[in-house]
Amino acid sequence: MSKIENMTPKAIVEYLDNYVIGQTKAKKTIAVALRNRFRRMQLPKDIQDEIMPKNILMIGSTGVGKTEIARRLAKMLGYPFVKVEASKYTEVGFVGRDVESMIRDLVSTSINLVKQEQKELKKTEIDEYVEKMIIEKLLPPLPKGATEAKQQEYENSFEKMRQKLKNGELDNLKIEIEAPSFTVEIDSNLPPELGKVQESLAKVFGGLNKENKKEVTVKEAKNILRQTASERILDEEQIKQEALRRAQEGGIIFLDEIDKIAVSSQNSGRQDPSKEGVQRDLLPIVEGSTVNTKYGPVETDHILFIAAGAFHVSKPSDLIPELQGRFPLRVELDSLTEEALYEILTKPKNSLIKQYQALLSVEGMELEFEEEALKAIAKLSFQANERTEDIGARRLHTVIEKVLEEISFDADTYAGQTFTVTAEYVHEKLDMIVENEDVARYIL
């Protein structure tokens, strides 16, 4: 069912180590929670139903890796995964997104995931169907009463044409095809009943221009007809059932900025009904309830919720007690030290330094960084975080952009050359800004 099947908690942490520096406690907690989903699925049905997921609350300043952990998990998982922001939801009766829409988003993600897997499994069948549709446009089928000799001759011609098509010899030929009519995007924020009405209207209006014939090259036709072939070959009902099962049994919702819906004890005199209302609306979904979606009802009992927030103004204890109780696992992420910032610059597979080197290589120049220059960038970023707002690793983006501003602007003049960024160059560009706190607030 999932890539997690073969991944132990240690392997999950090792994978995350390639992209997120430090935060070992958070990685371990999440790795165990994910592995427990797989362990639960191997147990007898009666025990499975009793084991509830242990939801996680991640607490840490902005830019320390909470969202990055979630983003990397999304890439790694074969489970349906959605990242949502708690601050976008409002209490029922207010204008805005209702909390049930996160479950509808999860189901849509699950449908896309299963559909993609099925397309991969039936790729050969889909490709053969597309080939048949294209060749029949170039070589119309024989009438029913054709002789056996004619049929044999047609089959030989068909095979020769198929070979030419595979070799790309027919790519520039023009054929007329029926392109699928455009689809109207259904708003996942709508309740299922309204969603079905919107879908029905879309089908009616889509049917008005069904004969959407267009002349395209064979190469273009291959991509256009793949959609039609997928619809004919894939079993939509089977995809729907499997997607609903996965969303229920393995779905993960990353609920970011949960601190924004906590009502701070400092403001207890003026309770915010919308914020507390969102928490109360969230409670039955996290505890376990049935949410109706356009694909069918979804039970939320076994969906894993990972909530995250900076909790600068409020505290986790400012959430309503019932909601606190539904997030038994708490992990605090560490603020980033100077050493951690240096490692973020150099260690990850997709480090900022590698990204800038790749970008400037497009201009034909090679960008190098002295070790001392990288240490200076980390030190100045750390100082800027201390003196102004602590925005964690995001500070590195601003600092490096400032260091490389002129180099990037004049990159074409360095074509065929190597530019080495030294510690002196970094200090020359940044010292004045970092030391002047007022300037730093606006520039860094």
Image (cartoon, rainbow, N blue to C red):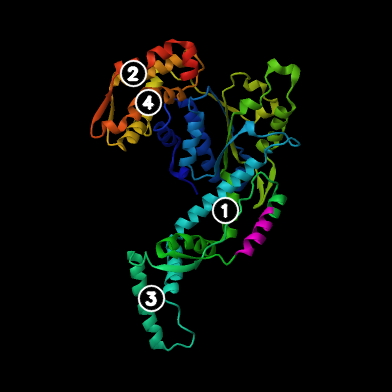
**Which amino acid lies under the numbered mark 2 shown in the image of this protein?**
Val
Q: Residue 301: in sight, yes or no?
A: no
Q: Main secondary structure of the magenta part?
A: helix
**Mark 3 or mark 4: whose residue is earlier in sequence:** 3
x and y percentages locating residue 198 in the rendered image: 68, 53
The image's mark for residue 405 is 4
Q: Quadrant of residue 52?
A: top right
Q: Quadrant of residue 49?
A: top right
Give the mark toward the camera: 3 or 1.
3
Q: Residues within 10 Å of mark 2 (few under 14, many from 20)?
A: many
From the viewer's perspective, is residue 231 above or below residue 191? below
C-alpha distance separating marks 3 and 2: 67 Å
- The span picked out in magenta is 198-209
The image's mark for residue 426 is 2
**Mark 3 or mark 2: whose residue is earlier in sequence:** 3
The image's mark for residue 242 is 1
x and y percentages locating residue 373 in the rendered image: 31, 19
**Residue at the image position 38 percent from the left and 13 percent from the top:** 431
Secondary structure beneath disc 4?
Answer: helix
C-alpha distance separating marks 3 and 4: 59 Å
- Circles 1, 4 touching at the beta carbon (< 8 Å): no
Give the mark toward the camera: 3 or 4.
4
C-alpha distance separating marks 1 and 4: 50 Å
Give the mark toward the camera: 3 or 2.
2
From the viewer's perspective, is residue 227 above or below residue 87? below
